[in-house]
Image: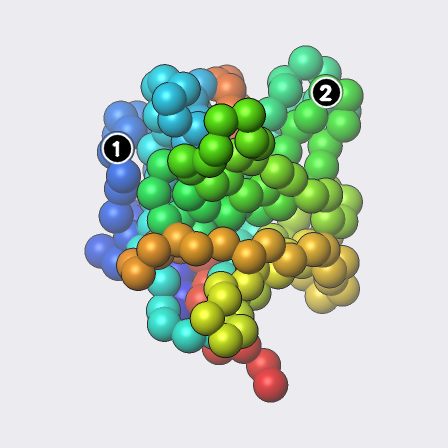
Amino acid sequence: MSTDFSGRALPSSLSWTRRPAASTFSVGGGAFRWQTQDADIHPPTTPLASVLTERAPRGDYVVETRVAVNTPATGDGTNYVQGGLVVYGDDGNYVRLTSNSIFDTRQTEFGKEVTPVPAGSPNYGNQVVGPVGSATTLRIVHRVVGSTQTYTASTSVDGRHFDKGGTWTAALGSTPRIGLISLGGSGFTSTFDYLRVSAVAR
């Protein structure tokens, strides 16, 4: 499956969780532009952010996007403003790979959240993958290993040479969804060139 945002509207295969105001996103010129939200998907934090997804395929797959987030190159106080990929079970159970502004840096963050957890246990963890470019290709490879669901991140600044990151295991329910997020603070825009889903190369 491939969504290249070549039209003037979002394809019918994509649907919103908490649809944002129409003024905050647009499709045109081969790109999907989505203003960053002053929200996240960490319940019980409110407000909860909008998420744009389609149903994930069964079995092994690769999901990829190319995104540019127009935060300043060094962060400059735009902490945690980000745009990128999500594999979404529900609010509080997901993995996400984003171009993220963190303090005075820009990083590709590969995060995992699990809820509920025992009292005193962390419910979110993150890893850093490759560098952020003017636009960054983000890729998550999902594999089923026995009864375990695994998710491995890779990133690229040129779309050809990839830095491979770590792997999360995550139980995201029987009907996880794959898609895009643009959140962590207002005042910026995530521009997505495409959303592609393909088979894992053997």
**Circle 1 — which element?**
loop
Residue 162 at least partly seen: yes
- In front here: 150 or 46? 150
Amino acid on which disc 2 is placed? Phe
Q: Position of residue 168 (x, y in %)?
A: 59, 54
Q: CA distance from mark 2 to mark 1?
A: 28 Å
The residue positioned 54% from the left and 43% from the top of the image is: 112
Toward which corner of the image does residue 108 lie, by quadrant? top right
Relative to 105, residue 164 above or below = below
The residue positioned 61% from the left and 38% from the top of the image is: 125
Relative to 76, residue 132 above or below = below
The residue positioned 27% from the left and 26% from the top of the image is: 21
Amino acid on which disc 1 is placed? Arg
| Residue that lies at the very extreme toward the bottom in this rendered image | 202
Relative to 187, residue 106 above or below = below
Mark 2, residue position: 103
- In front here: 129 or 7? 129
Q: Is residue 27 left or right of residue 201?
A: left
How many marks do you count on the picture? Answer: 2
Residue 192 at least partly seen: no
Mark 1, residue position: 18
Relative to 13, residue 39 above or below = above
| Residue that lies at the very extreme toward the left in this rendered image | 12
Toward which corner of the image does residue 1 lie, by quadrant? bottom left
**Circle 2 — which element?**
loop
State how the image is colored: rainbow
Q: Position of residue 103 (x, y in %)?
A: 72, 20
Q: Position of residue 157 (x, y in %)?
A: 72, 52
Q: Position of residue 44 (x, y in %)?
A: 37, 22
**Of callouts 2 and 1, which one flags the residue occurring earlier in the amino acid sequence?**
1
The residue positioned 22% from the left and 56% from the top of the image is: 12
